Amino acid sequence: MRVLAAMSGGVDSAVAAARAVEAGHEVTGVHLALAAEPATLRHGARGCCTVEDANDARRAADVLGIPFYIWDLAERFRAEVIDDFVAEYAAGRTPNPCLRCNEKIKFTAVLDRAIALGFDAVVTGHHAKLEDGALRRSVDMAKDQSYVLAVLTAHQLAHAVFPLGDSTKEQVRAEAAARGLAVADKPDSHDICFIADGDTRAFLAGRLGAEPGPIVEAGTGAVLGSHQGSFGYTVGQRRGLSLGRPDPTGEPRYVLSIQPKSNSVVVGPAAMLDFDTVRADRPIWTCGDPASDSFDCLVQMRAHGAVVAATVTGVVSGELTVALHEPQRGVAAGQALVMYDGDTVIGSATISSTSTAALTAGLTATK
């Protein structure tokens, strides 16, 4: 096959490209320039997509003896990832920008261009497996990235290659060293690449502006403090609330919900974060539409969150109701709910709300 290897400048993508070469594919490397002003991106090992990463990717391509190009996707990245990130926080939701980058940049913008140029597939260094068109978890559960790839369609997966799914991270690093790749010991990236100093709240304030509002107590409505913008908080947050009145029981308070219309942050005890019902929309079925309107599966609601059994209904309407078989705690709207059959991804949807079954029943009864 003629394949395009997306080379981020990290060890995973370098080894993935090397394995594609070794498999006999005609490989071309490409690094994505995602910032209009690269100097504004962070330097060193804290994030991805830095100036240093572009140089590391080029050096890896030289070692592998493959052609290498840099594609400028800064404007597309700004519109599809950064602007979306800001808009989601402004609406009181908590997005996952890496998931959106996979969906809109690496497997839409890049794949569409690759196919137009005559490539058969895009190779990436994600830790996940593809078997008979099905997306499955990596053998290295600590590095598994099937969650952030669950936004891909069956068509996109048909043109994707993930060579690392059967290897642990330690094996990948050892192979990189054996191949003479300088990135063998390069630390993994963890932070949001477009927030140079890692201060998400300040980044959002710079784009949305400070807007003072109240921090209120759930149930009583008592004002416990103030904030400079509800966008700076997320469900489950405990630190940074700066409350002027301690809880009478001595228990810590957590963010329970964000109310963007009133610019309010609602806080309460940890027990009020518990939920067993999730509503989610915009489903994407990676293996084709499910055979029935409801099914049992496993679900995961954070990139490294717990996996819990659930029953999914509402497939036909596209408005999913997910009944969890055991309560979970503190998941925010805007995050992805990924459905699994064992270690195989069924699909994903975007969480719109969470509640307890008792509350849901009460609301239904009052309508």
Image: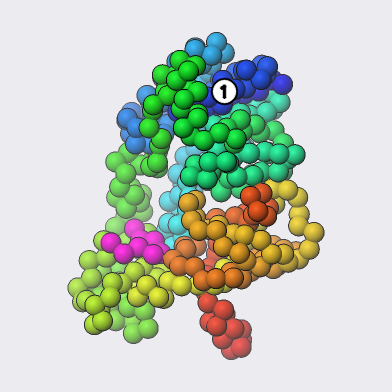
What span is in magenta? 232-239
> Which is more toward the observer, 267 or 166?
166
Left or right position of 286 against 359: right
Residue 362 percent location from the top left of the image = 56, 86
- Residue 194 place in picture, x, y as percent: 39, 39
Q: Residue furthest left?
A: 244
Label 1, residues with CA under 10 Å away: few <14, some 14-19, many ≥20: many
Instruction: Tell me, yes or no, whether the highlighted magenta stretch contains residue 237.
Output: yes
In this rendering, is residue 162 above or below 296? above
Relative side of 2 to 103, left or right = right
Question: Chief secondary structure of the magenta span?
Answer: loop
Whether residue 170 sits left or right of residue 241 in the image: it is right
**Figure quadrant of the N terminus:** top right
Give SS at disc 1. Answer: helix
**Whether residue 106 can be seen here:** no
Up-down: is 136 above or below 244?
above
* Camera-nearest residue between 137 and 160: 137
User: Which residue is painted at 53% across and 68% down in the image?
Assistant: 353
Disc 1: which residue: 17
Q: Is residue 33 above or below residue 270?
A: above
Name the residue rendered at 80%, 59% in the picture: 291
Q: Position of residue 314 (x, y in %)?
A: 70, 67
289 or 167: nearer the viewer:
167
Q: Nearer the viewer, residue 128 or 142?
A: 142
- Image position of 91 with respect to 190: above or below: below
- Residue at horizontal 19%, vertical 73%? 244
- Which x, y percent locates residue 220? 34, 85
Residue at the spot x=50%, y=30% of the render?
171
Magenta region includes residue 171? no
Within the image, what quadrant is residue 316 found in?
Answer: bottom right
> Most extreme residue toward the bottom, as rendered?
366
Mark 1: amino acid: Ala
